[in-house]
Amino acid sequence: MTRDLDMLKIDIDVIDTMIRLRGAPGAPQVQAEEAAERPAEPEGE
């Protein structure tokens, strides 16, 4: 599972790089630890 997540992150990083090379602002950089510390936001509210 960890390998799959690593491969997914690489894919996302490549897509983000291509978007930035085309001149559009990319996604903000968020560290995994910071995202894990935030409480989950309820959906549908």
Image (cartoon, helix red, strand yellow):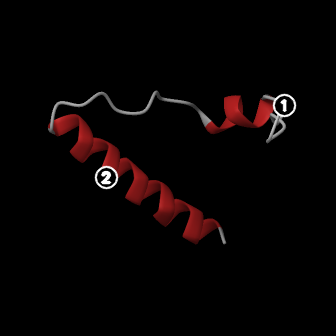
The answer to whether 14 is drawn above or below residue 34 in the figure is below
Decide if residue 19 is on the left or right side of residue 5.
left
The answer to whether 33 is drawn above or below residue 11 in the figure is above
The N terminus - image quarter: bottom right
Decide if residue 15 is on the left or right side of residue 6.
left
Decide if residue 15 is on the left or right side of residue 34.
left
Label annotation for residue 3? none
Q: 43 or 26, which is in the foreground?
A: 43
Q: 10 or 12, which is in the foreground?
A: 12
Q: Quadrant of residue 26?
A: top left
Label annotation for residue 14? 2
Secondary structure state at the residue bearing disc 2 = helix
Which residue is rendered at x = 46% and y = 27% of the image?
28
Decide if residue 7 is on the left or right side of residue 3.
left
At label 1, which amino acid type do we have? Pro
Q: Position of residue 24 (x, y in %)?
A: 24, 31
Q: Quadrant of residue 21?
A: top left
Q: 42 or 15, which is in the foreground?
A: 42
Which residue is rendered at x = 57% and y = 70% of the image?
3
Q: Position of residue 37 (x, y in %)?
A: 79, 30
Which residue is rendered at x = 32% and y = 51% of the image?
15
The answer to whether 22 is drawn above or below residue 10 in the figure is above
- Return the residue found at the far front: 45
Measure how far apart labels 2 and 1 are at the Cα level. Answer: 28 Å
Secondary structure state at the residue bearing disc 1 = loop
At label 2, which amino acid type do we have? Val
10 Å crowding of disc 1: few (<14), some (14-19), many (20+): few
Residue on which disc 1 sits: 39
Q: Position of residue 30 (x, y in %)?
A: 55, 30
10 Å crowding of disc 2: few (<14), some (14-19), many (20+): few
**Nearest to viewer (mark 2 / mark 1):** 1
Q: Position of residue 41 (x, y in %)?
A: 80, 34
